[in-house]
Image: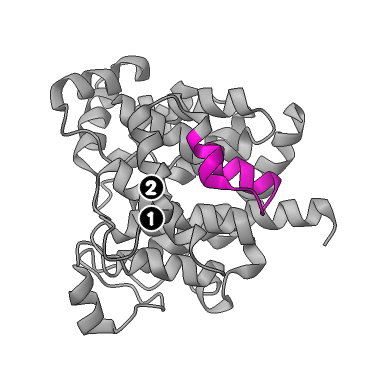
């Protein structure tokens, strides 16, 4: 591959990788690891089902909300919080089967006319400390694709993408760290993404959590809905495995909030290994794959404006 072809492959990999991780993980969302092991041995196939009874290849709110952000960036050519918030509200009004508690509270406020700069903060003030959830890191990857060439813009937009619904400082810092790691892998797949993520934030709790990634095992990790649990498990999966498939499988089989861990690990893995590394059997069944590829290509085009 030429440098441009490789970059395009990683862009497509980040968006589609996140979606296949979501679709794979949805089957075992909220299941304990030992329950997954008893039922599947090791889940490696996208089969649908799960507590949402999804069709094979369907995605959850993780990808649906990420797609809202990607569409806005692609169509507007800029980060427009008002437009992203409006797309979130439109999605909310479509009555999706699953919306996280923190996200739902903020979307109700947005739907009633509260500006996005205030809705997430109001939710934070109402729900803290219960709002340290992964509902914004699960969807923020498109921002990294858009702002890959400008670390300061990537950090600013990543923070704002979280604030729309998740204004808890830990969630904001988590999005900044994750997207710094994704952008670094897009720019150089051999990059130490964990170190880049640590250096991108001054939040000591996030830095400490990511700093212990390499000391973790599948037995010590918590893969629940806490934002730091998702970040730690996702970076662990991608840095301790040698292929995209093995990284996503490892993330999903941790159980608990498996669709979100799969989605975040999938974005990192796709940015590292590329679209060409995604197994055909996953790509072929993924619903909405063609649009994700088109969005990735558009975000790549836009990223050169800041190069």
* Secondary structure type for disc 1: helix
* Secondary structure type for disc 2: loop
- Name the quarter where the C terminus is drawn: top right
Vertical comparison of 236 with 165: above or below: below
Q: Is residue 214 left or right of residue 271?
A: left
Tag on residue 215? 1
* Tags 1 and 2 touching, CB below 8 Å: yes
Vertical comparison of 170 with 96: above or below: above
What crowding class fits label 1: few (fewer than 14 Cα within 10 Å), some (14-19), or many (20 or more)? few
Residue occupying image coordinates x 44% and y 26%:
159
Q: Position of residue 14 (x, y in %)?
A: 57, 53
Q: Which residue is mark 2?
A: 212
Q: Quadrant of residue 219?
A: bottom left
What crowding class fits label 2: few (fewer than 14 Cα within 10 Å), some (14-19), or many (20 or more)? few
Residue occupying image coordinates x 53% and y 27%:
155
Tag on residue 138? none
- Name the quarter where the N terminus is drawn: bottom right
Segment colored magenta: 180-198
């Amino acid at each position: 591959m030429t440098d441009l072809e490789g970059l395009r492959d990683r862009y497509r990999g980040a968006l589609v990788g996140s979606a296949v991780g979501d679709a794979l993980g949805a089957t075992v969302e909220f299941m304990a690891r030992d329950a997954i092991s008893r039922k599947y041995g090791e889940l490696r196939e996208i089969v649908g089902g799960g507590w949402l009874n999804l069709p094979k290849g369907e995605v959850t709110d993780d990808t649906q909300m990420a797609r809202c952000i990607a569409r806005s960036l692609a169509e507007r050519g800029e980060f427009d919080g008002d437009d992203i918030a409006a797309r979130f509200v439109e999605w909310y009004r479509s009555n999706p089967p699953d919306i996280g508690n923190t996200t739902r509270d903020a979307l109700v406020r947005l739907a009633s006319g509260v500006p996005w700069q205030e809705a997430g903060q109001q939710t934070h003030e109402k729900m803290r400390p219960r709002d340290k959830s992964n509902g914004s890191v699960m969807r923020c990857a498109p921002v990294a694709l858009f702002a890959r060439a400008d670390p300061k813009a990537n950090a600013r937009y990543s923070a704002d993408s979280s604030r729309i619904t998740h204004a808890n400082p830990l969630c904001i810092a988590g999005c900044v760290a994750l997207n710094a790691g994704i952008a670094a892998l897009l720019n150089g797949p051999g990059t130490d993404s964990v170190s880049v993520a640590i250096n991108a934030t001054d939040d000591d709790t996030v830095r400490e959590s990511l700093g212990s990634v390499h000391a973790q095992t599948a037995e010590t990790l918590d893969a629940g809905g806490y934002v730091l649990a998702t970040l730690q498990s996702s970076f662990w999966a991608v840095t301790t495995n040698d292929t995209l498939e093995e990284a996503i499988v490892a993330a999903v089989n941790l159980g608990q909030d498996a669709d979100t861990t799969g989605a975040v690990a999938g974005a990192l893995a796709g940015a590292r290994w590329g679209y060409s590394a995604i197994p055909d059997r996953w790509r072929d069944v993924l619903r909405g794959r063609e649009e994700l590829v088109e969005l990735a290509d558009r975000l790549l085009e836009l990223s050169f404006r800041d190069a």
